[in-house]
Image (cartoon, grey):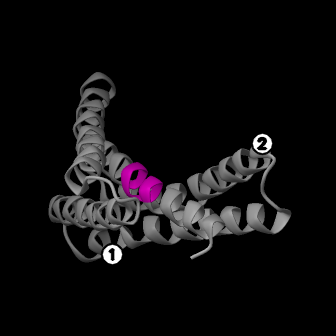
Amino acid sequence: MRHSLEVGFSFGLTSAVITTLGLMIGLGAGTNSKLVVIGGIITIAIADACSDALGIHVSEESENIHSQLEIWEATIATFLSKFLFALTFLVPVLLLDLFAATIVSIIYGLILLGVFSYFLAKKQKQSVLNVVGEHLITAILVIIVTYYVGLGVSIMFG
């Protein structure tokens, strides 16, 4: 796979999992509303995919070593992977009650991140345990923090 596509795909997938899970957990804990969580997922899929794609675009431009084609490949790959992976979290929310959908989404997100991290570690000849562990611990911390933030917002403003 071309480097520019790898950059976009890896950034988009990782960002989609962590951002969407954080949003789902925080909104779910704060509102316990399936409608709010669905709206949040769709919003994050659109707005954050655009934001991340522009961020990658500017970052790749600032390195001043990539062709315009490579920059746009990374930009489009980031947008598409972030957008599509974020939207996959709608499936459990649409099919299950919010609590079950949240559990399924956490498991799904951690598996996605773990499998991707495994292949990344293998490709870079790094310790699988270190790479996978670092990425999963980061995601779990985001889940924990956003859960308590959502609860806090609910208590303070609910």
- Residue positioned most to the top: 156
For residue 157, above or below residue 28:
above
Q: Quadrant of the N terminus?
A: bottom right
Magenta stretch containing residue 15, yes or no?
A: yes
Question: Which label sits in the foreground, 2 or 1?
Answer: 2
Measured as percent of width and height from the top left, residue 127 is found at 25, 52
**Toward which corner of the image does residue 77 lie, by quadrant?**
bottom right
Which residue is tagged 2? Answer: 62
Placement of 158 over or under 8, stated as above or below: above
Question: Which residues are the magenta region?
Answer: 14-20
Q: Which residue is mark 1?
A: 91
Q: Position of residue 21 (x, y in %)?
A: 33, 53
Q: In front here: 44 or 138?
A: 138
Magenta part mainly helix, strand or loop? helix
Q: Residue at x 30, y 31 (%)?
A: 149
State the image coordinates of residue 22 (x, y, percent, origin top left): 35, 46
Q: Is residue 73 magenta?
A: no
